[in-house]
Image (cartoon, rainbow, N blue to C red):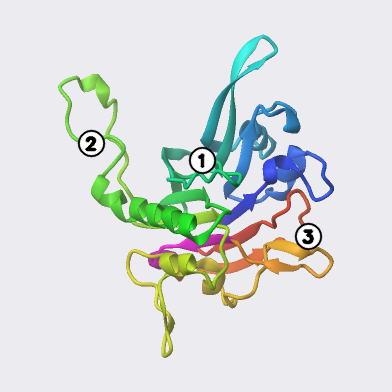
Amino acid sequence: MRVVTYNIQYGKGRDGRYDIDRVADVLVGADIVGLQEVEAYWERSGNIHQVERIAERLGGYHAVYGATVDIDKRLDGRHVRRQFGNAILSRWPIITTRTFLFPKLTPLTAHAIQRGVTEATIETPLGLIRVYSSHFSHLCDEERLLHAQLTLDVHRRAQSDGPVSAGGHPDTSWLEEPPPPVPAEAILMGDLNLTPDSPVYELLVGPTSHMYGRLNPPGCFCDAWVAAGHAETEGDTIYRDWDGKTGKRIDYIMVTPGLRAKVASAEVLRDADASDHQPVAVTFRD
């Protein structure tokens, strides 16, 4: 099973050209995809629904769009939703989905947008898994800590919250069939706008011990990049030097401890030029 996360910068490539088909071509071969900075009906990207276009280009993938910015727009005499946010695409059906909005500091002196985390429950060859796609704040650790904490709260509460619809109802038409169970295992991926030396990274994956390294306590995630044998300090995903392929690692795929042993490999797709970020791909063994 191949999982890819990609901040697509709304289809704007390194050459400044908008080309959503070029983005989709980078994703060919992925079974599950988490996207960030994906939009619908913006002038700059050609007034198309990018999630629908990518899903079609990949051969009819299942998709869910977690729009965090959602504004009415008049287009060719009709009303459409001008949207921006996260998405999850899957080779297999998406059983349930939820989107949670993050709190934001709303500064008066900086560009700030509503962000969130989108969840999709997918039946995979590894079993039923909760998959999250998110885009944390670019402003400061204080806001990213809020986003990380809400993400962890959603993850830790998932099973106690129960399925998307629970309990009986006198109107039997309300539940046409029993809702699917909530799986324990989860994958978190996205542009988290943080480096491994950040306190936000430590909140997500746990503290370090001088004897045992990263501890990954229950309720936290494991960095799949590290689980695949790489160092936390390797694997830059946004380049300041394109020729040298160096910059910062701010895009991640993280997994619950139960999936750690199933991580077979992880790579940064270093030559993709369809965005200002590089995709991260993780392959899981059955």
Q: Which residue is mark 2?
A: 166
Answer with left or right where residue 137 lies relative to residue 17. Answer: left
Q: Which residues are magenta?
A: 251-259
Tell us which disc is closer to us: 2 or 1: 1
Quadrant assignment, res 43: top right
- Amino acid tagged 3: Asp
As displayed, is residue 25 above or below residue 252? Answer: above
Q: Most extreme residue toward the top, as rendered?
A: 77
Tell us which disc is closer to us: 3 or 1: 1
Answer with left or right where residue 194 lies relative to residue 27. Answer: left
As displayed, is residue 136 above or below residue 260? Answer: above
Q: Which tag, 2 or 1, sits closer to the chain's start? A: 1
**Residues under labels 2 and 1: Cα distance?**
29 Å
- Amino acid tagged 1: Gln
**Residues under labels 3 and 1: Cα distance?**
30 Å
Residue at the location (29% across, 30% down)? 177
Q: Which tag, 3 or 2, sits closer to the chain's start? A: 2
Determine whether the residue tagged by mark 1 lies in a helix, strand or loop: loop
Mark linked to residue 114: 1
Residue at the location (48% across, 67% down)? 201
Q: Position of residue 113 (x, y in %)?
A: 55, 41
As displayed, is residue 285 above or below residue 175? Answer: below
Mark linked to residue 271: 3
Asked if the magenta segment contains residue 256, the reply would be yes
Determine whether the residue tagged by mark 3 lies in a helix, strand or loop: loop
Q: Position of residue 166 (x, y in %)?
A: 23, 36
Asked if the magenta segment contains residue 11, the reply would be no
**Residues under labels 3 and 2: Cα distance?**
46 Å
Sort mark 3 into few (<14), some (14-19) or many (20+) by Cα contacts within 10 Å: few
Q: Which tag, 3 or 1, sits closer to the chain's start? A: 1
